[in-house]
Each structure stands twice: as structure tokens, then as C-alpha cells.
Image (cartoon, grey):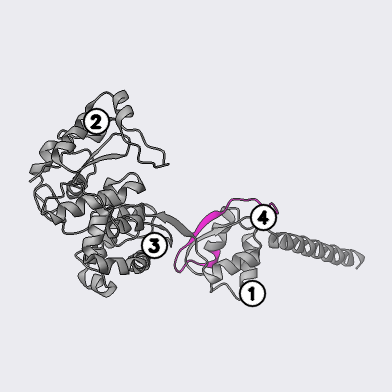
């Protein structure tokens, strides 16, 4: 009898011990993995329809929770186990279970930073989005040329080239391209509203303004030169002269390499402004506000020609004779060029480039009619 009573006591002590052990481990499981304040986020993706056990294991593997069972029990106890939303999340090892539940329940998904650089083309934007897993490049490009969608957005076709405003955006992984495009074009419209009064006075259409601004964006290295370059092209259009803008040919080739003389007259495309006496059919990139403003408020100058001086600046000329003289100056030794090149008063640091890189075979000569 005594032996049986001792066994019961031992069994009870073991139960109490394990209960205390479990309680201790359970309380430990409720604690954050670390108390450190400065910790790096861990990116975790929860798939659509993923089960609680799979989610808990994923979090444990990333070092975000202490215990899979405790996480599951607490999720059941609080009634949130069915509320976790699919998506990518940035979670921290110093977060409590309560804080993790809150993030997953409210769907506070991780947003990727995506920058559309000034002058980026439609296909370059699409590639950037796909690279960052925002949306499919092909789906984005198809939608960007969907005429019904463009009409719904209230933008001129035949594509969204020029209307995806260069800016830094934040998107979740696998975002619907409809939403991506709407965010970018809404930003363009916001900028355009500030310029609408000037646009009406210019007597140019939105497409013409954006197209010319996209060329200015590609040609100008310094902001201060944008209104002058815009003036050159507007002056040439008024006189019925071809723009002869190299970037338009680059756009046709989908390659922004240095052009050769052969390219100017063999690239059969409506974007070749050496062969066609008008603006290209669409913009050749997505211009910034400063480039749009340059077209709407061009410098009051009589220039018809310009040539790159080799340091990011340009030398502007009124006549073809002056233009040839400017080219001769550029071909002079670098020391002579530094002595004679005009100071445009800009404080920006010039990016030094070689004359060979800056000047194609025909020296970017804008030929007179």
C-alpha cells in the first residue's frame, strides 16, 4: 500500500514538474526572440491559402519566433489564425507575438522601393518592375498599349510612353499592373495640373509637349541648359527644319549607344528625326517636370544649332557657319578648349567624358535646309 502511495506521489511530482517546465517554456515562447532594439528585418512571404503550421515553421526558421507550438496555440486562443493575409512581410526578431499577429492580420505588407529615373523609356520601366518582382514586364507593356485602358485614363495614345512620371514609388510584390500604371499616371497628372495654364498658352497639345520634353530630357545634362535646348528645337520646328535629334534614333533602335553616320540615314523609322521633318509619333521616354517646363518656358534665344562640348555642356549657334566654328573649337586640343569654352554659370559638377564618346562621326552636325 505504501509503495503504491509513493508511486502516486512520484507521478504527481512528475506531472507538476512537467507542468512547471511546460509553463516556463510556454512563457519563454511568448517572449520576443531578442530584446535588442537595433535588428534587421526579415522578409517572409505568406502564400495564399498557406496553413498556420507552415506559417509558424517559416517564422521559426527566420528566427522571428521562439516556438512553433506556442505561436499556434496563441493564434488559436486569440482567434486570429484564419485572419492572416497573404503577401510579403518585413518582420523583426524583437517583435512580440501580439505585434506579429497584428502585422499579419492587418496585411501590413512589405513595399519595394522602385525608382523610375528621368528619361526612362516604357520598356526600361517594365524591366525595372519585373526585376523587383512587382509585376510581369510583358503584362505591363501589353496594358500600357491597350487603347481602351489609355482612353479610360484620359491620356493620348498609342502608348503610355511619356506619361509614367519619373519618381520613387513603393509597391508590394505581385501588384496588379493596372494599379502600378494608375499610380504612375496619377503622378503625371498631378504635375501636369501645375503646368496646364502654360500648356494652353503654348498652343501645343499634351502629346507634342511631352514628346519634345522627352527629347530635351535625353539631350540635357545640366538643368540650366534645358530651356535653351528646348528653344533650339522649337525654333527649328517653326522654320520647318528637321529636329535631327540623336536620341530619337536611339529610341527607334531600342539602344542608347553612340550613333554612327550610317545610322542617321539608314534607320527607317518615323522616330528618325533626320529623315522626318516633324516630332516623332510618341515621346521617347518619361520626362521630368523641369523638362516639361523647359518646353513651356523656353529660353528667348535665336539658336538653331548645338554641339556637345565634351563636359556635359553644349555650344549653341545661330547659323550653320557659327556651328561649324563651334565644332572646330571642340576638335582643338583640350587645353585650348578649356581656355575658350564659355562658362554657363552652373554650379553642378561636370561629368568629364572624352570627345570620342561625345561626338559621333558627323560631329552631331545639324545640317541646314
- Where residue 16 appears, as percent x and y from the top left, is 82, 65
Of helix, strand and loop, which one carries label 2? helix
Q: Which residues are magenta?
A: 34-53
Q: Are marks 3 and 4 in contact (CB under 8 Å)?
A: no
Foreground pick, 25 / 345: 345
Main SS category, magenta section: loop
Label 1: how many Cα within 10 Å (few below 14, some 14–19, many 20+)? few
Front: mark 3 or 4: 3
Count up the numbered dots.
Answer: 4
18 left or right, relative to 89 = right
**Vertical order, 138 against 325 (above or below):** below
Q: Are marks 4 and 2 in contact (CB under 8 Å)?
A: no
Label 2: how many Cα within 10 Å (few below 14, some 14–19, many 20+)? many
The Cα–Cα distance between marks 4 and 2, rounded to whole angstroms, is 65 Å
Q: Identify the disc placed on residue 33.
A: 4
**Most extreme residue toward the right, as rendered?**
2
The Cα–Cα distance between marks 3 and 2, rounded to whole angstroms, is 50 Å
Of helix, strand and loop, which one carries label 3? loop
The answer to which of marks 1 and 4 sits earlier in the sequence is 4
140 left or right, relative to 347 = left
Does the stretch in magenta take in 365?
A: no
Q: Identify the disc placed on residue 78.
A: 1
The answer to which of marks 3 and 4 sits earlier in the sequence is 4
Q: Identify the disc placed on residue 174.
A: 3
**For residue 133, what is the image quadrant?**
bottom left
Residue at image mark 2: 330
Of helix, strand and loop, which one carries label 1? loop
- Where residue 75 appears, as percent x and y from the top left, is 61, 70
Front: mark 1 or 2: 2
**Vertical order, 243 against 2 (above or below):** above
Amino acid at each position: 500500500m505504501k509503495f503504491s502511495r509513493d508511486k502516486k506521489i512520484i507521478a504527481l511530482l512528475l506531472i507538476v514538474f512537467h507542468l512547471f517546465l511546460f509553463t516556463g517554456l510556454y512563457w519563454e515562447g511568448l517572449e520576443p526572440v531578442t530584446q535588442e532594439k537595433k535588428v534587421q528585418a526579415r522578409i517572409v512571404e505568406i502564400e495564399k491559402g498557406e496553413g498556420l503550421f507552415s506559417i509558424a515553421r517559416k517564422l521559426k526558421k527566420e528566427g522571428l519566433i521562439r516556438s512553433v507550438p506556442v505561436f499556434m496555440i496563441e493564434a488559436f486562443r486569440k482567434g486570429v489564425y484564419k485572419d492572416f493575409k497573404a503577401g510579403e512581410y518585413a518582420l523583426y526578431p524583437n517583435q512580440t507575438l501580439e505585434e506579429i499577429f497584428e502585422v499579419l492580420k492587418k496585411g501590413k505588407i512589405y513595399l519595394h522601393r522602385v525608382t523610375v529615373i528621368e528619361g526612362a523609356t516604357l520598356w526600361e520601366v517594365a524591366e525595372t518592375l519585373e526585376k523587383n518582382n512587382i509585376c510581369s514586364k510583358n503584362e505591363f507593356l501589353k496594358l500600357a498599349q491597350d487603347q481602351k485602358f489609355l482612353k479610360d485614363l484620359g491620356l493620348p495614345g498609342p502608348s503610355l510612353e511619356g506619361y509614367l512620371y519619373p519618381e520613387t514609388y513603393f509597391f508590394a510584390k505581385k501588384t496588379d499592373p493596372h494599379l502600378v500604371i494608375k499610380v504612375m499616371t496619377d503622378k503625371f497628372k498631378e504635375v501636369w495640373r501645375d503646368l496646364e495654364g502654360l500648356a494652353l498658352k503654348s498652343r501645343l497639345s499634351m502629346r507634342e509637349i511631352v514628346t519634345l520634353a522627352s527629347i530635351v530630357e535625353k539631350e540635357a545634362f545640366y538643368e540650366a541648359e534645358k530651356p535653351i535646348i528646348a528653344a533650339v528645337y522649337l525654333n527649328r520646328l517653326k522654320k520647318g527644319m528637321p529636329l535631327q535629334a540623336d536620341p530619337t534614333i536611339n529610341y527607334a533602335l531600342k539602344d542608347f549607344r553612340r550613333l554612327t553616320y550610317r545610322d542617321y540615314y539608314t534607320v527607317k523609322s518615323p522616330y528618325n528625326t533626320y529623315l522626318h521633318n516633324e516630332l516623332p509619333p510618341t515621346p521617347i521616354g518619361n520626362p521630368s517636370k523641369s523638362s516639361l517646363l523647359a518646353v513651356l518656358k523656353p529660353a528667348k534665344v535665336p539658336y538653331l544649332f548645338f554641339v556637345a562640348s565634351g563636359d556635359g555642356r553644349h555650344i549653341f549657334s545661330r547659323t550653320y557657319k557659327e556651328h561649324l566654328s563651334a565644332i572646330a573649337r571642340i576638335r582643338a586640343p583640350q587645353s585650348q578648349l578649356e581656355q575658350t569654352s564659355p562658362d554657363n554659370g552652373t554650379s553642378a559638377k561636370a561629368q568629364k567624358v572624352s570627345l570620342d564618346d561625345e561626338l559621333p562621326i558627323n560631329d552631331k552636325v545639324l545640317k541646314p535646309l
